Image: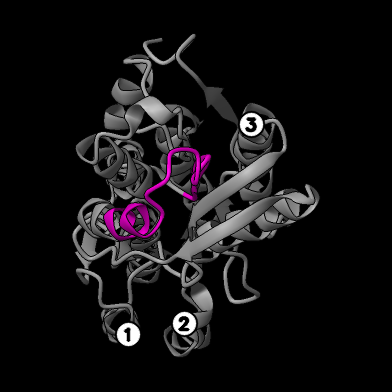
Amino acid sequence: MSLNKSTLALAGILLATTALGTGAAFAQAKVAIVTPYMAQPGTQFYVEAFQAVADENDWDVNVIDTAGDVAAVISRIEDLVVQNVDAIVINVDPTQVTAGLQAAKDAGIPVFGMDAGADPLLVTNVTSNGYAMAAETSTYVADRIKGEGNVVMFVFEAFPPVQVRGVVADAVFGNYPDIKVLDRVTPDVSDGGIADSRAKMEAILSANPEPGSIKAVWAAWDQPALGALQAIEDAGRSGEGIVITGIDANPQAREAIAAGGNFEASVAQDFSGIGAATADAVARVLAGEEILQSVTYVPTKLITKANATE
């Protein structure tokens, strides 16, 4: 069988087109994670789990830490838009980086929240149910102090997943006429939050020296709870039975809870689950699927002395 020149030319074009199509289909996806909170253990777990799934998918992942500088996240996203990455993941309040998110949308680059906060400019936000976690720990506190006494709250309203926890705790404590929020503290989190929380708790203890003047410390995450625990122990007031709760159940918190001291409860977020679920969402969208849920929740679990070592 003989082939004329036209047939050979057409065959060559078809082969070239097929080769280009195959190469595009199997090109290595470029994905970036941008966060100012890499100092936080939870964020580190998110990223590790995300990278594990990314490795399975052979993605090229770029992790960008702005080291507490939220404003810098915008310029980093804009840089990624210029680099034409395939997807961006953020771990920061989306309302604070709208300009960057809009730039990504205009370029057709999907952006995902990894415990960030819901926003129309995000495909979805993968997180724990902050309302449920805060309800669980604040009602734990209210029950333990029998519905009366002064409570110190550690909050952080600049980050939506943590801000909602404070809103719920305020509502729970507000439903008890004999519970008074003695102080509402926003610690400096640039070093993780323990040191400044400790210093602020020391000042509160000094201003309220009478035994029983503080019944509990409710913290929106574990680092302030650990700082408060250190301050209470150093002040020699651990014997007063001041109840401390946190949220996250990181290893240091679990150890403190297992020891049976003032730090009594936390809620374990499935950090690895959040990271893996975020990576799964990215994979689905890169494969052409549309995700309809604006928020994707990953289950949590209350941790007390009974199960702290599990």
Say what secondary structure mark 1 lies in.
Answer: helix
Q: Are marks 1 and 2 in contact (CB under 8 Å)?
A: yes
Say what secondary structure mark 2 lies in.
Answer: helix
Residue at the image point whose x is 46% and y is 74% from the top: 109
Sequence-wise, the earlier of marks 3 and 2 is 2
Residue 194 location, x and y as percent? Answer: 25, 50
The tag on residue 140 is 3
Q: Is residue 300 shown left or right of residue 245?
A: right
Residue 114 location, x and y as percent? Answer: 46, 55
**Circle nearer the viewer, 3 or 1:** 3
Can the viewer see residue 288 in this picture? no
Residue at the image point whose x is 57% and y is 44% from the top: 128
Q: Amino acid at mark 1?
A: Ala
Residue at the image point whose x is 29% and y is 50% from the top: 59
Residue 203 magenta-drawn?
A: yes
Sequence-wise, the earlier of marks 1 and 2 is 1
Query: Which of the pair 227/125 is nearer the observer?
Result: 227
In the rendered image, which residue does mark 1 sit on? 71
Magenta region, residue range = 201-220
Residue 18 location, x and y as percent? Answer: 39, 57
Q: Is residue 33 shown left or right of residue 112?
A: left
Q: Is residue 215 shown left or right of residue 231?
A: right
Can the viewer see residue 310 in this picture? yes
Question: Which of the 4 quarters of the picture holds residue 120?
Answer: bottom right
Q: Amino acid at mark 3?
A: Tyr
In the rendered image, which residue does mark 2 sit on? 96
Alpha carbon of mark 1 to alpha carbon of mark 2: how far? 7 Å
